[in-house]
Each structure stands twice: as C-alpha cells, then as structure tokens.
Amino acid sequence: MKYTVNTAVFGNTFSVPCSVADKHLKLATANQLKVLLYFMRNISDGIDPQKISAELSIPQSEVDDALIFWSQCGILNGEAPAQKSETKTVSVTCEMPSREDVIKRGLEDERLAFLLREAQLKFGRNLKQNESSLLVALYDDYGMDISVILLLLGYAVSENKCNVTFVRTTATRWLNAGVETVADAEQLIADCARQKLAWSVVQKTFGIEKRNPSAKETELSNLWVNEWGFSTDMLKAAYDICVDKKTKLSFA
C-alpha cells in the first residue's frame, strides 16, 4: 500500500528541530520521543514531569530520563536536578585497634570472635594484623552488622581481592550508600555487577582497550545500557556521530 501525507492536517502544526530526525532518531527510545513531542506541542506550559507522566501514562522516572537525554542532546536547556541535602561522608580511616585491643575485644564479644574466625576461613589463611584491626573497627566504630561484614569478605574473595585496601574501600562505599542489612549489600553488589557488564558492552562496541573505566565512563555506560536500554546498534550510531563531529571518542 502506498502512503502519502494528509496535507489537510497541516493547518494546526508545531515545530520540531530537524536535528531530532537527522541525528537523534536512531538513538531515542519510543518514550523519549513521546516526551519530546508532548513538550514541543505544549511548550508554553513549561516542563512538568509529573503532568507529562500522567498524560502519557509513562513512569515519571522514564520522563526524567527522557528530559535528561534531550538536554544532553542539546534540544532542551535543562536545569540540574535539585541537590539532596548534604550528608556527612563516612571514611574508614580512623586509627585502627592495636593487636592487644583486638585480642581483648575477641575475648569480650563472642560475635566478634566468631567474625574473626570466619574471616580466616573465608581467606583461607591467618589474618594479618591490619586485617583483624580493620574488622574490629568496622564492627565497633562503624556499627556494621556481622552478617554484612561477612558478606563483604565473601565478596572480596569472589573478586580475588582479599586485602585491606579492597575491604576498606568497599566498606566505605557501603557505609556511604546507607547499607545496613545483607539485602542492602546484595543489591549494591548486583548493581556493581550490572555496571561492570554495561562497561564491557560499551568497551567492546567502541573498541576501547581493556582497562578500568573512569567514574564518568561507568556512569554513562550504566545510563546508556542499563537505564536507557541502548542496543549495540544504537551505541555504534552514537559512536559514529561522536567521531564524525570530534574525530575522536569523548565521554564528555
């Protein structure tokens, strides 16, 4: 069947930038296009994500993602999301307990003694002084639950990083993320795995040498692959546009 445009409807139109069709059509999802068209049609009303969500029957989180996408494309002049109230950042850098303190605490608290024994079993060796001191500090000074610490140690083993640096860094990240239970920690581990997978997809698609990603690269690859659901074809299209414009890949 041959289709033609019904010119009778042109009496009531609104504008959409040509770049939307020329550059971004391949990359935009259906919901992102819906949000843009709705906004362009009702441009005088301003942006109200809650109203757009209700009118289009799209979750507000997807409306927010769409607005961010079009802002990054230069189609919208978006305001940065409202900043959450500043919270104090936890850093596991306090003075660690001495060997004598570790022994004393192990004798005083059976749960702590259990933690130290289980840690040795997980690592398959005797704990070093700085390792046992760190575990006592996490339990006594930072209030981490024994089960959460044990999960952290199991995670270190699975990553083949049974060392103080990894345990301290991971504990700091978990504390700042508000991890209190095993379920919280398991969710964070799962999110980290998804981010790693997203980076591997972007890395392979863009032909990037094997290396650890920067914080920005992790953020963007997770956004593209996990949140926006970009396929490898869409990533390749974005790569081609970037290289055509800048002659080299940029995550800026």
Image (cartoon, rainbow, N blue to C red):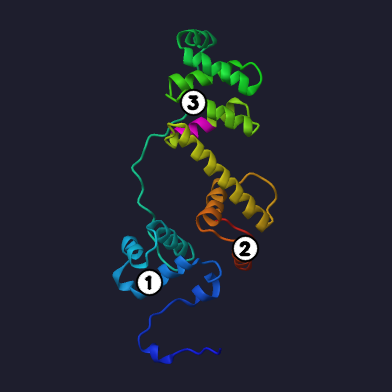
Q: Secondary structure at mark 3?
A: helix
Taking the spot 53% from the left edge, 25% from the top edge, the residue there is 150
Tell me residue 97's x, y (percent). 50, 15
Question: Which picture quadrant has residue 142?
Answer: top left
Q: Which residues are magenta?
A: 170-175
Structural distance between the alpha carbons of marks 1 and 2 = 28 Å
Q: Earlier in the sequence, mark 3 or mark 1?
A: 1
Please, what is the three-letter code of the amino acid marked with disc 1?
A: Tyr
Q: Disc 3 marks which residue?
A: 147
Q: Secondary structure at mark 1?
A: helix
Please, what is the three-letter code of the amino acid marked with disc 2?
A: Tyr
Asked if the residue under mark 1 is in contact with the one under mark 3, i.e. CB atoms within 8 Å, the reply is: no
- Mark sitting on residue 239: 2
Taking the spot 56% from the left edge, 70% from the top edge, the residue there is 26
Question: Which picture quadrant has residue 205?
Answer: bottom right
Q: Residues within 10 Å of mark 3 (few under 14, many from 20)?
A: few
Q: Disc 1 marks which residue?
A: 38
Q: Is residue 147 above or below residue 29?
A: above
Q: Nearer the viewer, residue 246 or 175?
A: 175
Q: Earlier in the sequence, mark 2 or mark 3?
A: 3
Q: Residues within 10 Å of mark 2 (few under 14, many from 20)?
A: some
Q: Is residue 68 above or below residue 131?
A: below
Left or right: 86 in relation to 74: left
The secondary structure that dominates the magenta segment is helix
Taking the spot 35% from the left edge, 40% from the top edge, the residue there is 86
Q: Is residue 183 above or below residue 248?
A: above
